[in-house]
Amino acid sequence: MTAANLHPFFAPQTLAKLHGLQLRARRIVEGYVAGLHRSPFHGHSIEFAEHREYAPGDDLRYVDWKVFARTDKYYVKQYEDETNLICYLVVDVSASMQYRGPQSPLSKLEYAQCVAAALAWLVLQQQDAISLVTFDDQIRAHVPPSSSAPHLKHVLQVLETSGSAPATRAGQVFHELAGTFSKRGVVVLISDLFDDINTLAAGLKHLRHQRHDVVVLQILDAAEVDFPFRRPMRFRGLEQSQNIVADPVALRRTYLAELQRHVDAVQHFCRESEIDYRLTRTDQPFDVTLSSFLSSRMNRVR
């Protein structure tokens, strides 16, 4: 199991995938968003901000009937979370994210970059703010939040130039981000989460303690999940220099048990901390990933 050569994110073939992804994303989001501010990222806080005109698909619970009685027009109450949404995209660019299995069209990093790009586009289409952070053993890039149209180009440029260090210290980075993200928002973490469970849990709980709505997309390659290898081979560590020659058939049962234990532990602390968790495989089509994710978000915020 070796790391594939990581092609530039904006190589022609990847640009074509991203263009197709954006077209599918447009269709997906239009199927779920029936009004400018009916977004899968919005909730309703208790802090009232202002009114706006009713749009088809808005939740009738938030229609201000007193205003209707005075004006004979429908207005919806907007709250602070709805009017000032910030979506923080946090993308893992560590060495383990460069892995691409023998049957995978993209590495985990390339897949994460495409998902992040699509989500950034969707949020900006909602006229809300997007922020981007890339990290490995430390924060590598931090794009401050903005809702301006040219902001997407900046986000994509940072994704394109994402480097990586040999190690991951995700939990430590999450603690730092909890102190950095001053305004409450939706934090979308895209990572394989290959780090110590206890430090991961502590870092994510710190983000929740700061009252952020946290979403975890754990990106895994199909080969990591299924371990289809049969012939003896050399396994090369991407975040450690150690190489091991082994018979994968002898390792398979123990490996799969350890991976499942790790995934179960991540799911458990996410559930306990009210963190929205989704396991995503790189052989899963983007439109399936996005539609499933957006559908679950819409059901959650209704």
Image (cartoon, rainbow, N blue to C red):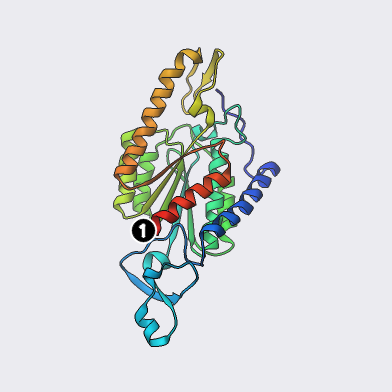
Residue 78 seen by the camera: no
Residue 92 seen by the camera: yes
User: Residue 182: x, y in percent?
Assistant: 36, 58
Image quadrant where residue 216 sits: top left
User: Residue 142: x, y in percent?
Assistant: 47, 51
User: Residue 195: x, y in percent?
Assistant: 39, 33
Which residue is painted at 56% across and 50% down in the image? 117
- Mark 1 lies on residue: 182
User: Residue 281: x, y in percent?
Assistant: 51, 36
- Outermost residue, right direction? 12
Frontmost residue, 293 versus 10: 293
- Outermost residue, bottom direction? 70
Which residue is painted at 68% across and 46% down in the image? 16
Frontmost residue, 224 versus 145: 224
Which residue is painted at 29% across and 43% down in the image? 272
Using residue 75 as the reference point, say whether residue 149 is left or right of it: right
Image quadrant where residue 199 sits: top left
- Up the image or down, 93 lies above or below 36; here it is above
Quadrant (top left, top right, bottom left, bottom right) of the N terminus: top right
Tally of numbered tags: 1
- Dot 1 alpha-carbon crowd within 10 angstroms: few under 14, some 14 to 19, many 20 or more: few
Q: Secondary structure at mark 1?
A: loop
- Up the image or down, 251 lies above or below 160; here it is above
Quadrant (top left, top right, bottom left, bottom right) of the C terminus: bottom left
Residue type, numbered disc 1: Ser
Using residue 53 as the reference point, say whether residue 156 is left or right of it: right
Which residue is painted at 42% across and 68% down in the image? 83
